Image: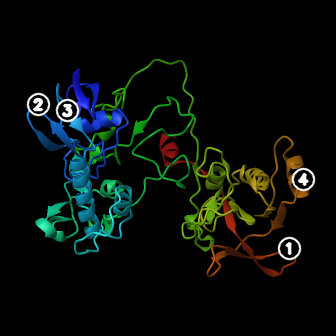
Amino acid sequence: MVTFILNGREVKAEEGTTILQVAEANNIYIPTLCNHKALEPAGLCRLCTVELFDGRRKRFVTSCNYPVWTGMEVNTDSEEVIRHRKMLIELLLARCPNNDYVNQLAEQFEVDAPRFKLDDDDCILCGLCVRVCERIGANAIDFSGRGTEMEVATPFETLAEACVACGACDFICPTGHIKLSEITDKEIRPILSEYNAGLTGRKPVYVPYAQAVPNIPAIDRSKCAHFLTGGCKICADFCPTGAIDHSQVDEEVEIEVGAIVLATGFRPFDPTQYDDYGYAKHPNVVTSVEFERILSSSGPWHGHLVRPSDEKEPKKIAWLQCVGSRDINHCDNGYCSGVCCMYAVKEAMIAKEHAKDGLDTAIFYMDMRTFGKEFEQYYNRAQEDGVRFVRSRIHSVDPVPATDNLVLGYVNEEGEAVSEEFDMVVLSVGMEAPPGVIELA
């Protein structure tokens, strides 16, 4: 242990700990722009400078990368230190006068309009983006230029091939200066959550779902920066128990059993084959699986009934039945999937329960197949509770100009052409055998 004086008080700390770490542990505030727990401290911004007395003379050191030692005396807010910080903030304010982050610092330290010529930049040259890119292992960006001409840029100021589009530089930038479109031409896409049917994103290190067995995080090797570049391993540094081991590999284990159950499962039908329904073109056209996640308390909106485009509560929802079932025109699925009628009725009933105001629900169907114990009674109850059942095949789903609503075109049972506007459309997708099951058979 190391014993030293911090702001007139004796404190103890582990050897190798920095002044900034000890100050934070003792609830002493030291500002810094360039320090981040995931990166090695660099002392680039100099805002964390403190006054150090070594027994002979006073000097100034950056607290984020200066280790503590026995007998030293540190003052984090002396008059000289405060004057130094104000000067740095004044320079930053002149460089980035319109940046919220810098203006908050200026207000905190009572720095008024700077005495220097104003610029219109939003980069404070903290270096976080450059250092995190190095840590990731991509080295796609770096500092270029000198003095007032210094800036963050890619080599030769062209789109960088080395960039892996991980987004770490954009995430860590405190001022919003970094624009990934200026660094790479790779497509920037979130990692979609399989459990939430792609409605939300997930991290490369994630728990597949709340009740997963075993309920421990997994690493997606196809997305993890370490497996893409050989660098990073930030998660291993942050794990308090040291549980993350990137060197683990898949193993084949032989076990002796008495029987094998082939639980083949199914694959939901891909409704993009129905071009007239606008799935994947309009955010408010969703599949029944996606709508299940919207209604679920563990889903992306915690069970609140909202539509994806603007997260507002819908007033009218339509269900389109037999999408991918009993259809040999769009696909070769002439069979009935057997579950779509009843899950659509269930979803309409639950949606009504979740709606704060009145909800108009309409199910467009060919035949209602309610085989199953008391299914017919549930269907009758849905009709009594106001769920509309319209016997018709929808021929088109079109967006309403200047809104997020949708127009359904169909022919009713009287043979009349009808157009009706809805806030959301749910496609009741059928089931298909997965390719792996066909191969297994």
* Badge 2: residue crowd in 10 Å (few <14, some 14–19, many ≥20): few
**Secondary structure of residue under mark 2:** loop
Disc 3 marks which residue? 73
Q: CA distance from mark 2 to mark 4?
A: 88 Å
Type of residue at label 2? Gly
Type of residue at label 4? Asn
**Secondary structure of residue under mark 3:** strand
Q: How many marks?
A: 4
Left or right placement of residue 436 versus residue 69 in this view: right
Earlier-in-chain disc, 3 versus 2: 2
Task: Tell me residue 89's x, y (percent).
Answer: 27, 60
Toward the viewer: 299 or 247? 299
> In the rendered structure, are the residues bearing label 1 and label 3 in contact, judged by CB atoms less than 8 Å apart?
no
Disc 1 marks which residue? 413
Q: What label does residue 95 carry, if any? A: none
> In the rendered structure, are the residues bearing label 1 and label 2 in contact, judged by CB atoms less than 8 Å apart?
no
* Of marks 1 and 3, the one in the foreground: 3
Identify the image's colour scheme: rainbow, by chain, secondary structure or one colour: rainbow
Vertical comparison of 399 with 226: above or below:
below
Residue extending furthest left?
56
Disc 4 marks which residue? 380
